[in-house]
Amino acid sequence: MEQKLVEIVHFCREKAKELRATDPNDIPMRTRMAHFAHIQDRSGETYVQVGMDARLRIQEWCFEYLKRRGWTHLISVSHCAERIEEAIAFRFFKTCRPVDTGTISKMVNGLDKSIQNDVRPHRYLWPCHICYGDSPSEFLIGTVRFRPTINCRDEIDTAIASWGSELDKSFRTRIEEHYSSFGWIADVTVETSDKAAAKRMSLLAVQIALTAIKLLLSHGGTESRIRMSEQQNYLLERAELHFIRDEPHLTWHQTAGQAPFAKSWWEDLNRGDNAERLRALDRVVRAVIQPTEQTFLKLKYLNALRWFNDASIDTHAASRITKFVTVLETLTGCNERDDLAEAVGERVAYFLGGWPEEGMPEEVKAKVKRIYAVRSELVHGVRDPIDLELGRIATSVAHLAHMTLVAFLDLLIFIGIDRNDYDHAKLRRDFAVIKNNDQRMRAAGAVCRPPTNGGFRLS
């Protein structure tokens, strides 16, 4: 890594000399900004044009540097690159130090210390739509704490009062109304040395925690009301103006922002099989902001949950279909390059075949194949994107994605969700065992597999 950085600094010096001798008028306007991209020291006094290629090399180095140290959660690549650029500008252009491994080592050590010393807790409070009412008064999913907004008024008022100058009354009202329009606040703390990285991780943690709630609902694949403020806009009130010939029509829509849950909904989710599933989802959410807890299985599941959430709040049926099929591929694909659709269809079929109301594996596989065909037609521009049938198909694939997520979570519980010795090869083996076990059970006269993790026999 140090030798690579030596080469990058030499490249920056050579490019700086070259650009100083270049007439800007000789560079096409469309590429001029990239051609004369610059770095500067922290004071801003030393400003050096090195070109975009040099800056991209610095960013690539930073990505590898953070990955090797396991610090991709502590600071973003762009923020790390800014620190390296400032150090290069100061050490090798302002003070003109020699470009050797000794000087570079000191610079890297300084970067190590600055990142470690800047680590501090960043606490974010994100407004959310979840359910009507204020029950329970508090609940946790992983590291994310949820409370009714009405119980967070003191913290909101304190934050508003911290504004640097006197707030205009109307502006203050707008801020207060923004928070009061959401029934819940998600509270999460992330320890990083970079505010941008903390924000990104806190958003992801809250999104996954909310998706965990959707997952345990019977209609989770079509539940679009459960979301946070930073996700796609969800207007509770909106007007539609249209004309039929010359006759005007105005329609006003007022939609509930919270899902209609029973008062005991949280206690209900913590009963039976869902209680164990919820504890496993706690581990997935924790892994978002605790990289030491990340494993192959958790990251695979986390990725599928993100696609599931994106699909559930998307307003276009064609896009929803594409994203829900991606959920199936993310969960059951094992890095196959050929016949992926066939592999996914078969694995989903043996995951869900025999669950109540899901049908036999052959029926499930046929459903997956039909949906795959529609997805392919949409992606390749063959299918009409405003086909009225797409809404029905989107609902069908939403159910398949939802049930596959539940079945896969049960498999992870059975395997051990914290295991760190898994890869695609082991997962392919497990899929094959599930298929063989299912076929043996049916040959022996068993009609269906119980929908619990105890139904998996992988030995």
Image (cartoon, helix red, strand yellow):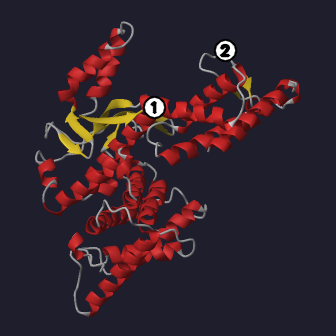
Who's the residue at 37% across and 76% down the image? 430
Name the foreground residue: 396 vs 71. 71
Q: Secondary structure at mark 1?
A: loop
Q: Secondary structure at mark 2?
A: loop
Q: Which residue is mark 1?
A: 194
Who's the residue at 21% across and 21% down the image? 154
Q: Point out the image quarter for the N terminus.
A: top right
- Tell me if I can see residue 223 in this picture: no
Name the foreground residue: 98 vs 411. 98
Residue 78, percent from left and from top: 56, 35
Across the whole image, how many numbered discs are drawn on residues?
2
Residue 70, percent from left and from top: 46, 46
Mark 1 touches mark 2? (CB < 8 Å): no
Name the foreground residue: 5 vs 30. 5
Q: Residues within 10 Å of mark 1 (few under 14, many from 20)?
A: some
The disc label shown at residue 45, or none:
2
Residue 250, percent from left and from top: 40, 34
Q: Which mark is first along the chain, 2 or 1?
A: 2
Q: Is residue 309 above or below residue 394?
A: above
Who's the residue at 54% across and 76% down the image? 339
Q: Is residue 110 above or below residue 67?
A: above
Residue at the outermost bottom position: 444
Who's the residue at 60% across and 16% down the image? 43
The disc label shown at residue 55, or none:
none
Q: Amino acid at mark 2?
A: Glu
